[in-house]
Amino acid sequence: MKPELVSFKLCPFVQRSVIVMLEKGVPFDITYINLKEPPEWFKAISPLGKVPLLKVGDTVLFESAVIMEYLDEVNPPSLHPADPLRKAHNRAWIEFASGLLAGQYNLTMTAQDEAAFNCQRDELRTRLKQLEQQIAGPLFNGEEFALVDAAFAPYFMRLELLEGWRPLGLLQGLPKVTEWARRLLERPAVQQSVVQEFAELYRKHIQTAAAYGATVFGAG
């Protein structure tokens, strides 16, 4: 039985798991729902009312990091480093990636004025500078693609779109992050991890937000 992901089309956290399965060549199904009007069957199986979910037979997993770890473990070879310390280091930076995604959401969807927008942009810039010091290059650990790379790819995909709509300069002077992002976005598994109309849907999503980001990124 194929595993089934449940999410919505713009979710960066389900995208992580899709990337992992595409990299590993694992067959899977994906069901998209409207989170604003979630179906009753979803409410019945989602303990936190959040996505993504992974259905494996009668068992439902939630939380994207847990789902990624499970998919990696049951579909060898592992995308984690073999060294326990390096593996733990990777897991810590996967959590860091989740914080970057939260900051990106705040930048586009919740900042209410220019001052709040600039504050959020500066915070993201600070975090990316921290990230620059951690990258072995060209990918996070070197040449081999890892779960930590899958965790950051959704952030970089959205950042590329945002920078195209309104240059923010978030990667300026960060050569390792810039090259890492470029390499990730060139990978077929990353390119195929979203729906074809992703860019259009993402921009419309920002346009509908009652936030400053609608003014910054919404035109066009």
Image (cartoon, helix red, strand yellow):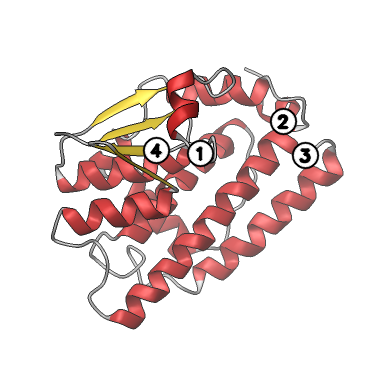
Q: What type is the residue that disc 1 sits on?
A: Arg
Instruction: Return the disc, 2 or 4, that comes first in the chain's sequence.
Output: 4
Q: What type is the residue that disc 4 sits on?
A: Leu
> Dot 4 lies on which element?
strand
Q: Residue at x 53, y 26 (%)?
A: 202
Q: What type is the residue that disc 2 sits on?
A: Val
Q: Mark 1 highlights which residue? A: 158
Quarter placement of the C terminus:
top right
Q: Residues within 10 Å of mark 3 (few under 14, many from 20)?
A: many
Q: Residues within 10 Å of mark 4 (few under 14, many from 20)?
A: many
Cα distance in 3D space between marks 3 and 2: 11 Å
Eye-nearest disc, 1 or 3:
3
- Which label number is shown at residue 53? 4
Task: Please tell me whether residue 82 is drawn above or below residue 194 in the rendered image.
Answer: below
Q: Position of residue 95 (x, y in %)?
A: 50, 61
> Dot 3 lies on which element?
loop
Q: Is 13 placed left or right of 205 in the picture?
A: left
Q: Mark 2 highlights which residue? A: 216
Q: Mark 3 highlights which residue? A: 111
